[in-house]
Image (tube, rainbow, N blue to C red):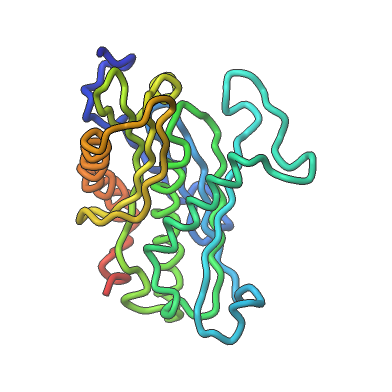
Amino acid sequence: MTRTDGRSYDALRTVSIETGVQRNPEGSVLYRCGQTTVLIAASVTEGVPDWMRDSGHGWLTAEYAMHPRANPERKRREGRSGRIDGRSSEIQRLVGRALRAAIDFGKLGERMITVDCDVLDADGGTRTASINGAMVATVIALDRLRATGLVHKGVLREPIAAISVGLLEDRPMLDLCYTEDRDAEVDLNVVGTPRGGVVEVQGTAEGAPIVREKLDQMIDLALGAMPALAEAQLGALRALDVDIERLLP
C-alpha cells in the first residue's frame, strides 16, 4: 500500500528534538515526529513516596495529557471533572514503566523524578513520542545531578526508545500516523533498547487474531528502529554537551 506521506513501510517519520525549552525543569524537551509534537519536562525533587522512605532508593513517575487543541476538534481539558480519562492514565503508566527500566534507583538516592508529557499536536504515536522525548529530558536531569555530585556513573542502566508498528493489509508497517493507526488490523507499541532488548510490548488485534509469524515480524521491525531513535536522542544530548557515558555503568 502507498502511505499518505510517501514513506516506505519500514521508515520512521522525521524526528526533531529541541532541548532547554523551559527554564524551570531540570530537563525539558520539545519532541516532534512527523506532525506529532510533545512537550516533556523532567523535574527532580528530594524525597520519595512514603512507601519508599528510608529504602535508599529513588523513584520516577509520569503524567500525560492532551492539549485541548491537539486534535482537529477541541476536547475538554483533562482533569476538569476531577479525574483523567482511562487512555491518559494507561499512557502515563506506560511512560513511567518504560523510563524506570532505564534507571538504577539504588544509585539515584531518595529522590523523585516526575516526567510531565503534554501533547501539543497529535497525529499518532503520542505515547511513543512521549517516551522518546522523556528519555532525553530525564538524561538531562540526571546529568545536572551528576554535575553537582549527587549521582554518579551507573545511575543510568541503558537508554530506551519506543515506536509504534501496525499491520495494514497484512503487512507490518513502522511508525504509524493517525490514519494508519486508525485502520490497522493490529497496533503495537514497542519499548526497547538500542542493543535489541525488549522493555515492553503493548498492543492488540483489532479484529481477527494475529498469527505468531506476523507478530514476530512486527516486533523485529520495531526493534530494528531502536538504534536510529537512540541516535536522534544522543544527537540532542550532544548538542547540549551532555555525555551519556558519564551516567552509564
Quadrant hosting residue 162: top left
Q: Where, quadrant-wise, is the N terminus in this rendering?
A: top left
* Front residue of 119 and 54: 54
Residue at 51%, 48% in the rendered image: 40
Q: From this view, report whether residue 170 is shown above or below residue 211.
A: above
Vertical relation: 240 (above or below) 106: above
Please say if 122 is above or below 198. above
Question: Where residue 3 appears, x then y in whole percent?
Answer: 29, 16
Rendered residue at 23%/29% (across/down): 11
Q: Quadrant of the C terminus?
A: bottom left
The image shows residue 246 at horizontal and vertical percentages of 29, 71
Q: Position of residue 5 (x, y in %)?
A: 31, 17
Q: Describe residue 1's horizontal placement relative to residue 107 as left or right.
A: left
Which quadrant of the figure has residue 69?
top right
Choose between 163 and 230: the one closer to the eye: 163
Count the numbered circles shown.
0
Residue 21 picture location, percent across and down: 50, 47
| Among the 4 quarters of the image, the one containing residue 114 | bottom right
In the image, is 83 to the left or to the right of 67? right
| Residue lying at 73% horizontally and 42% vertically, measured from the top left | 79
Q: Nearer the viewer, residue 173 or 194?
A: 173
Q: Residue at x 61, y 82 (%)?
A: 53
